[in-house]
Image: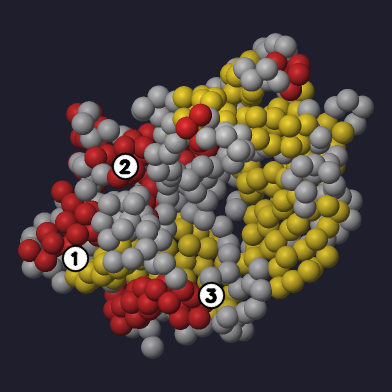
């Protein structure tokens, strides 16, 4: 099966040429199969074996969320698939699979954004547009992933960020919907399914489940049969007495915004609990339940409350959830995060002196905006590998490939919006800010360390009380081995514990 994820992460600029090299020949003599434009994000070429067929698929990535897909025929010629630029395309057996990021009117019908469509590939190439909708989006539903087996496609959806699985199998020349027999899925766990054989030679599948309090479990199943546990990851913290809850806050524009809360059972609501709120909110990245040994051991087990924010900019509710916070509407993501923080205080889970926040990369930008927009709301901030100078972000490293997400600072209309929230331009000498820890790495090749360096320097120059740590090794992930991961994590959690009052 060949399949492009419906939720790409932020990409660094990549390859512009796709070449075919044959073993035993000189690399310099490799024939060019496809050449992208200098302005493209990159070019990918993949050979896939699927149900006995071999296909070469070329993808020209125009921007982070737009692309063109080409199929290579037996004569080596490329044919472009007639699809919307913001659609994701792949194949399963003799079917073309398409995921939409915008409404698409074709063949006399309009298919909604977020839908997963299937059509016979040969018929599509011949001009037919006979699609079957394998996933229909709804207000609370989005497509999480799919798994192509020998005789079926398993569809994994999120419904209010809860996984639900079902399967499409072949009827008489058409795909038909059936229930999916699998192991019991925990209400607040994350479940993933993928084929044992990606070439479509078996109906066996792998399944993993993981939750905030439950380590990952690997299961093996076959179509029509429940999955059997094969192995469990070890537990790294004591989860006894801890509970997971899902709550919803109301953002400034009335939007219902979900968040997960991990805390002690029967928590006394007196506003005294050290609480860590984590967020990202960008690039169609969904934050779903998962086992985190570090936060579990050093925060939750010790009595701290941990909160995961599902703000707009992610894909928890499909492409519309992401698109709602793009470019000129970016403030919506920040309003969502503020609404969750205020809801935690209103519910008396915590209070400003005990409320800390953490985020990295695009989440580091989120932290910078919280620092400058609502310094009154938080007791401590951990800002990791952040974007902070939105006037120059597009001139540094991979930044130019993110203008579809944030806007172009060189365009007056875009800069008028960016200037309102760009942290580096909005930090002031006379304002009292919560104590903040900035971390970055010298060798970050995605978000330039200059963002954190400049912000820290300006705040120190203005007399603010901040901390700064720069690891000389590691890329965007801030570390090169487990020892460094432990060190950087210890810095962050020790800082938060001291600032927020966690014993």
Q: Residue furthest right?
A: 172
Q: Name the residue nearer the viewer: 139 or 145.
A: 145
First in sequence: mark 1 or mark 3? 3
| Residue beneath disc 3 | 293
Q: Name the residue nearer the viewer: 424 or 187.
A: 424
Q: Please tell me in which quadrant of the rendered image residue 419 appears.
A: top left
| Residue beneath disc 2 | 399
Pick the quarter of the image with the C terminus. bottom left
Q: Secondary structure at mark 3?
A: helix
Q: From what the image shows, is residue 169 above or below residue 306?
A: above
Q: Residue at x 39, y 73 (%)?
A: 484
Q: From what the image shows, is residue 417 above or below residue 310?
A: above
Pick the quarter of the image with the N terminus. top right
Q: Residue at x 27, y 52 (%)?
A: 448
Separation of residues labelled 3 and 2 (CA atoms): 32 Å
Q: Please tell me in which quadrant of the rendered image residue 20 appears.
A: top right
Left or right: where 491 falls relative to 461:
right
First in sequence: mark 3 or mark 2? 3
* Residue 144 pos. (x, y %): 63, 46
First in sequence: mark 2 or mark 1? 2
């Amino acid at each position: 099966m060949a399949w492009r994820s419906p939720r790409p992460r932020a990409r660094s600029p990549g390859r512009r040429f796709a070449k075919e090299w044959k073993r035993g020949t000189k690399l310099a003599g490799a024939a060019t199969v496809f050449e992208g434009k200098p302005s493209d994000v990159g070019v990918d070429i993949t050979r896939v074996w699927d149900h006995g067929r071999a296909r070469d698929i070329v993808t020209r990535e125009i921007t982070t969320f737009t692309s063109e897909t080409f199929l290579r025929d037996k004569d080596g010629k490329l044919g472009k698939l007639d699809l919307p630029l913001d659609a994701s395309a792949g194949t399963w057996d003799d079917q073309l699979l398409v995921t939409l990021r915008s409404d698409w009117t074709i063949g006399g019908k309009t298919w909604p954004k977020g839908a997963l469509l299937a059509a016979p590939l040969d018929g599509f190439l011949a001009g037919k547009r006979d699609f079957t909708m394998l996933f229909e989006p709804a207000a609370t539903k989005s497509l999480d992933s799919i798994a192509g087996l020998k005789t079926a496609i398993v569809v994994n959806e999120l419904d209010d960020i809860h996984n639900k699985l079902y399967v499409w199998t072949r009827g008489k020349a058409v795909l038909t919907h059936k229930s999916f027999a699998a192991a019991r899925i925990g209400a607040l766990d994350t479940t993933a399914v993928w084929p044992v054989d990606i070439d479509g030679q078996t109906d066996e599948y792998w399944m993993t489940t993981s939750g905030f309090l439950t380590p990952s479990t690997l299961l093996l199943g076959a179509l029509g049969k429940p999955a059997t546990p094969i192995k469990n990851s070890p537990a790294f913290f004591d989860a006894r007495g801890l509970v997971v809850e899902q709550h919803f806050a109301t953002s400034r524009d009335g939007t219902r915004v979900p968040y997960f809360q991990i805390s002690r059972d029967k928590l006394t609501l007196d506003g005294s609990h050290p609480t860590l709120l984590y967020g990202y909110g960008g690039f169609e990245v969904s934050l779903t339940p998962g086992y985190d040994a570090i936060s579990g051991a050093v925060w939750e087990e010790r009595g701290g409350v941990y909160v995961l924010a599902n703000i707009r900019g992610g894909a928890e509710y499909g492409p519309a959830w992401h698109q709602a916070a793009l470019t000129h509407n970016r403030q919506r993501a920040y309003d969502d995060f503020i609404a969750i923080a205020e809801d935690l205080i209103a519910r008396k889970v915590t209070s400003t002196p005990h409320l800390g926040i953490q985020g990295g990369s695009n989440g580091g930008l989120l932290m910078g905006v919280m620092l400058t927009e609502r310094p009154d709301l938080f007791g401590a901030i951990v800002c990791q590998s952040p974007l902070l100078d939105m006037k120059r972000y597009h001139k540094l490293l991979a930044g130019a490939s993110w203008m579809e997400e944030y806007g172009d600072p060189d365009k007056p209309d875009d800069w008028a919006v960016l200037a309102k929230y760009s942290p580096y331009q909005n930090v002031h000498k006379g304002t009292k800010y919560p104590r903040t820890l900035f971390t970055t790495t010298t060798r970050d090749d995605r978000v330039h360390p200059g963002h954190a360096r400049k912000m820290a320097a300006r705040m120190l120059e203005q007399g603010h009380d901040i901390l700064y740590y720069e690891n000389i090794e590691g890329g965007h992930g801030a570390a090169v081995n487990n020892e460094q991961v432990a060190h950087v994590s210890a810095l962050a959690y020790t800082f938060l514990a001291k600032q927020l009052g966690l014993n």
